[in-house]
Image: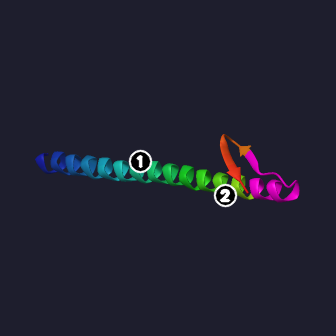
Amino acid sequence: MKQVKGFLLIEAAISLIILLLCLNLFVYCLTETRKIEANSQIKSDRAYAHYILRKYHLHKIKVHGIEYED
């Protein structure tokens, strides 16, 4: 019976380690997704601001709280 208890303890420890690795990977994926989304938003805001500056011959425009100048 002691061999079975030891096996169950090792099995539980391994499953806990696997669970923690999966949780770590999940959190990493979420943070990277948010970084990519933020960078994409900044790039699209910059492109939009430059398009509007050139199209309407403006000197300054504010997009999402950031001022862009020509």
Quarter occupied by the N terminus: top left
Residue 58 magenta: yes
> Which numbered disc, 1 or 2, marks the residue closer to the eye?
2
Which SS class for mark 1? helix
Left or right for 3, reference 60 = left
Which amino acid type corresponds to the residue marked 1 in the rendered image? Leu
Q: Provide the residue designation for mark 2.
A: 43
Measured as percent of width and height from the top left, residue 22 is found at 41, 52
Measured as percent of width and height from the top left, residue 23 is found at 41, 48
Viewer-closest of 30 and 66: 66
Q: CA distance from mark 1 to mark 2?
A: 31 Å
What span is colored magenta in the figure? Answer: 48-61
Q: Earlier in the sequence, mark 1 or mark 2?
A: 1
Name the residue at 20% across, 46% down: 9
Residue 59 magenta: yes
Q: Which mark is residue 23?
A: 1
Viewer-closest of 33 and 24: 33
